[in-house]
Image (cartoon, rainbow, N blue to C red):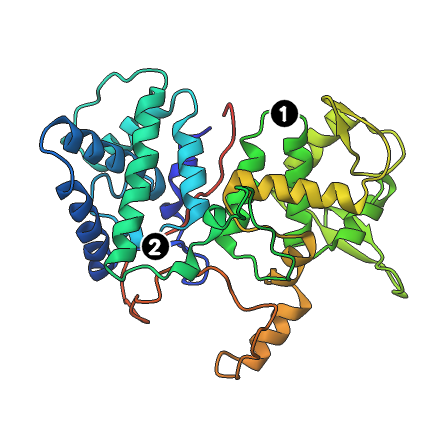
Amino acid sequence: MSADAYGAHHNTPTDDSADFCLAPEEVSKGEQAAAAYIASLKAGDGRRSAEDALGTLATVISGGVCDDLRFPWHQVRTYHQALALSIVKEPGAPTKVELLRCRHDHTRRFQQMPESYPAKHVQKMRVSLRRVMEECRSLGFLDDELDQGLESATSNGSRARNTRERVVTDGEVRALLSACDMDSGVAGCRDALMLGLAWFGCLKTVDLINLSLGTLAFDQRQQRMTIKVKAPGAKRSRRIPLQNDELIALEDWLEVRGRGDGPLFSPITRGRVEIRRLSAADVKKLCDDRSEQAGVLPFSPNDLCKSSPHSVEAGRRKRVGSDAPKEAGSAFSPLYSSYSSNEPEETPGAERITFPYRVRIGS
C-alpha cells in the first residue's frame, strides 16, 4: 500500500467525482455529530480512545487534510467505511498515518509507531464510526436511503441481493478496484481488469465472457494496447484502448494465467487458473464477492457499463438534462450520493476530496 492511496486530494476532483466536500458548514455538521457521540461516553480513557480512533479514520479518508473530529462524517458511505477499515488493518498503516499527520502539521514531531494497529484498536475505530453515523442520522444530517449498503440484510443475516439495474457511482468503482488491488491472491488482478473494462470500456457480462487472448492487439497508429470487441448481432467490432491501470492488471493476470490461446478470463480453483470460459454465474459470484469486500450494494458488469460516463446511456442522460422529469421506479435512480441531501448546492472554493485514489499492496 502506498501513501498515495491517502493523497487523492492533491488531484483536483470534479464536483461529480469527489466523495467529500470540506465546506465549513459541512465540516461543522460532522463535528457536531462526533461531539455528540464523544459526550455520550464516560470521561477518561474511553473518550480519548474514541477521539483517537476517529482522528485516525479522518486522516486515512482525507489523506491527512483532517485528523480529528472536524470531518464531514455524514458524507461517509458504507463503501468508504469498508475500505478505510481495510486500509488501517494493513501492516505499516500506523506509520503511514503518522507520516500523513506530520506532512500536514509541520509542528508535529514524528513518533515511532507499531507495525500494525492492535485488533482492539481497529474494533474501536469500527464501533466509533458506526456510532458517529448513528448520531448523523439522529441529527437529520444523513438520509437513510443513501447508506443502505452492508446494513441492508435479510432476516437470516445474509446480504440482500438487489436484482434491479442500478447506477454505480465513481466512488463505488474506486472502492471496488481498490478492494481488488488489496487482494494479494490470484483473483485480484483478474477482477480488477474485468471491472475496469466494464467501467471504462463499457463491456457487459456477455462481452467479458467472450473475450479471448486473440482479442488483444497493439494499435500501431495510436501506440496503445487495445481489446477488440464485437457485440452479439453487431456488424462491426470496436477497439477499446486500455487505461494504464488496466495494462498493469493485464500484465499481472497474464503472468498468472499464461499466454496460451483461449478465453482471456478464466475461473480460479484452489489458487490455480483453469483455462476455460467463465459462466454468467461465475461473473455474478465474482461481483457479489467484490461488492461485499468493498462495502457497496450488489451490482453487475451491465450496471458498470450503463453507469460509465463513456456509455451510450450516459450520453443520453446528459442530453436529456437534469431538468427532465424522472420516471417513477427508474432502474437508474441513484442509490448513493457523494454528499448528504442537506448539502448546499453550491459551495464555491470548498476543498473536495476523492477517496481512495488507488491502493496497491507492497508498493
Q: Position of residue 274 (x, y in %)?
A: 83, 28
Mark 1 is on which residue type?
A: Gly
**Residue 74: horizontal and vertical position, in percent?**
31, 54
The crowd level at tag 1 (other Cα within 10 Å; few <14, some 14-19, many 20+) is few
Q: Above or below — where is 288 with respect to 1?
A: below
Q: Is residue 95 visible?
A: no
> Where 302 sits versus 189, above or below?
below
111 or 270, which is in the foreground?
270
- Comparing 135 with 173, the one in front is 135
Question: Which mark identifies residue 286?
Answer: none
* Of residues 267 and 64, the one drawn nearer to the viewer in this rendering: 267
x and y percentages locating residue 69 in the rendered image: 20, 43
State how far apart marks 1 and 2 are (Cα): 32 Å
- Residue that carries the numbered disc 1 in the rendered image: 185
Q: Residue at x 50, y 61 (%)?
A: 335
Residue 75 numbered mark, or none: 2
